[in-house]
Amino acid sequence: MLTGWDRRDVLMAGAAFSVFAAAPTTAAASFAVRHIVVADTRFAASRAFAETAAKSGAPIVWTEGDITDFWRDELDLLWRHQKVSLSGLTAYPTLFYLERLAMDRGLRVVFRQEFRQVEPGARPLIAWRIAPKPRSAG
């Protein structure tokens, strides 16, 4: 069981995950998309988000803010061969780097929402989803 998070963190994480689970995307209809969740162990809300996602069978990539190893060892190769979607509840720098890397592989941020943390002085987290660009009709 996770410690260091409260009822608000759990509700926030559950709400963020429900946005990803409930919203069908054009990309999901166009590709056989495998989905990976990125979570930052430094933030209780991010850990709770990942725990909720894991219940649906989504693979979790744990980070402490640095996604270099994940990108180099796994994601770059995956994105070269298939359009894997990602979602996360992380600090902005993680999303920023993944968004820039995704652009080179034909993916984009399709959802982004800021969540304020309850700890005084804590920076906000961003709930996000990166998915393939929709195929144009015609």
Image: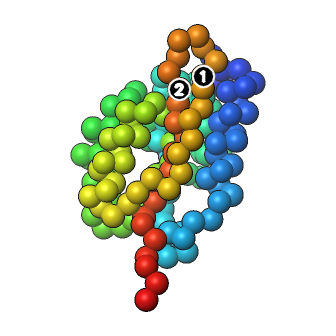
Q: Secondary structure at mark 2?
A: loop
Above or below for 60 versus 47: below
Specify the label residue 124 is tagged with. 2
Rendered image quadrant of residue 69 = top left
Circle 1 residues within 10 Å: few <14, some 14–19, many ≥20: some
Above or below for 49 versus 111: above
Q: Is residue 50 visible?
A: no
Q: Quadrant of the N terminus?
A: top right
Q: Secondary structure at mark 1?
A: loop
Q: Pointers 2 and 1 in contact (CB under 8 A)?
A: yes
**Chain-order first, disc 2 or disc 1:** 1
Q: Quadrant of the C terminus?
A: bottom left
Residue denoted by label 1: 117
Q: Is residue 58 left or right of residue 102?
A: right
Circle 2 residues within 10 Å: few <14, some 14–19, many ≥20: some
Q: Amino acid at mark 1?
A: Gln
Q: Is residue 81 visible?
A: yes
Depth check: give the residue in front, 68 or 1: 68
Q: Amino acid at mark 2?
A: Pro
